[in-house]
Image (cartoon, helix red, strand yellow):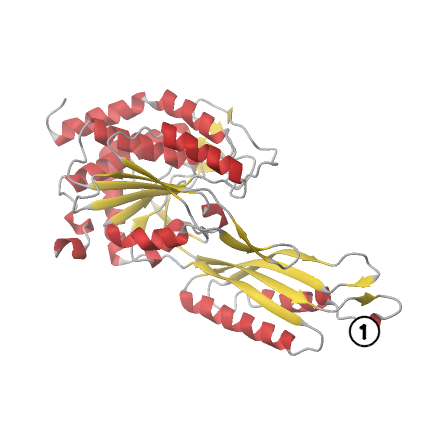
Amino acid sequence: MPSSSTDKRNHAYAWIAAQQSQITADLIELANQNSGSEHLTGLLQVAQWLEDRMNLPHAGFHRIALPPRHTVDDCGNELAVETGPALRWDFQPERQRRVLLAIHYDTVFGAADSFQSCELLTVDRLQGPGVADAKGGIMVIRTALQALNHFMLAEDIGCTVLLTPDEELGSPSSKQLYEQIAPDFDFALLFEPALPTGELVAQRKGSGNYTLVVHGRSAHAGRHFEQGRNAVVELCRMLIRIAELSGKRPGLTINVGNIQGGEAVNIVPDLALARLNIRVADTSSAKWFEQQLKQFVSELNTMDGFRCRSLGELASPPKMVTDEMQQLMRAVEDASLDAAGRIIHWKETGGVCDGNKLAAAGLVNVDTLGPIGDGLHSRSEWVSLSSIVDKSQLVVNLLSRFSAGELSMLQRQRFETE
């Protein structure tokens, strides 16, 4: 076993590079198993695969049951829907300095989707469901921690791995778990894919999903049209007003993504519902939107024969670049340069992830330490296999230097005063 930290890191980098064929084989096997966010059987099967195949020796393992998520069906009924478990591994949790490594194992591709298997397009490009978002990120976590353990490079820190089943739905069941554990760590690394040109994400917008349900009064469209109260028409009128709010605050966008209502055309429809998503640059814009929405709902409820309700929230607050995050970003830049000679650049994005929630809970994080990929949420999703190696080496460098005491600026003040 090499003696100095630099020698150990260099041997760890070489060991990681030698694992690429096994990483590829395991990623294909993992991605070929469907774990769509709403496919409970698939989630449970993939959770078992991860429990059996993460192969993280010396870590305590816990399977965490999560509360059901609450949703609204097409008839306007509120339902509680079961989800898969969160999976947690703890290395040396008694250490004073601790790091959270997290990502999701669900995908957007359901059990009935035609995109179910991987195809190797080139020696470095693998196409398949979830290969970048975010099962490739799971491979980065596993490879980096195996190397850190094998070469004894993280002896003075505690590392916790958390894999969750519902991020693609906005983490409705795992959000509370993230909030509960956030105070336990100095910082977090999340393994969403990097951008296709290699940049990492810095600042993120916030996001919220909302459902509107309008009840009217059914009537025969010919004999008693005047007695009816058309829920579809009134919902559409409200949605036009809501859509016109886009751009009224800096960075605010509103997407009406789904509308349902009505049956036979000779019946005045008594039920209509719509689902929409908002993106905001700051929390004040979210509050402003919700005030407008509340007013629209209240106005409709004063109309004869109509009832309206809204459900939803800003599930992912905006993620801002704070002074503490800038320190972590600089440490990630140095680790990339030291490990592979690669310069990191940063971009802002309108997309959200669990990094938003952890930042809102007070835990500084970088959330795109997964591999390079593109075509996310489409049947052309791909990942760069060599970038799994690169990111694993970066993580080894960062965490080994944190363990060695070289990155004391990343240690949270509350740990230092215990």
| Residue 23: quarter of image | top left
Disc 1 marks a residue whose amino acid type is Gln
Name the spot of residue 91 as percent of width and height, x first: 24, 38
Q: In the rendered view, would you say 409 is above or below 268?
A: above
Judged from this view, the residue extending furthest toward the left is 3
Residue in view at x 41 percent, y 45 percent: 65
Question: Would you name the residue on which mark 1 appears?
Answer: 227
Q: Nearer the viewer, residue 250 or 46?
A: 46
Q: Nearer the viewer, residue 61 or 144?
A: 61
Q: Nearer the viewer, residue 46 or 205?
A: 46
Q: In the rendered view, would you say 276 is above or below 405?
A: below
Name the spot of residue 297 as percent of width and height, x first: 59, 72
Q: Quadrant of the N terminus?
A: top left
Q: Secondary structure at mark 1?
A: helix
Name the spot of residue 30 as percent of width and height, x first: 45, 29
Categorize mark 1 by other alpha carbons within 10 Å: few (<14), some (14-19), many (20+).
some
Judged from this view, the residue extending furthest toward the right is 223
Name the spot of residue 45 as percent of width and height, x first: 47, 33
Is residue 241 visible in the rendered image? The answer is: no
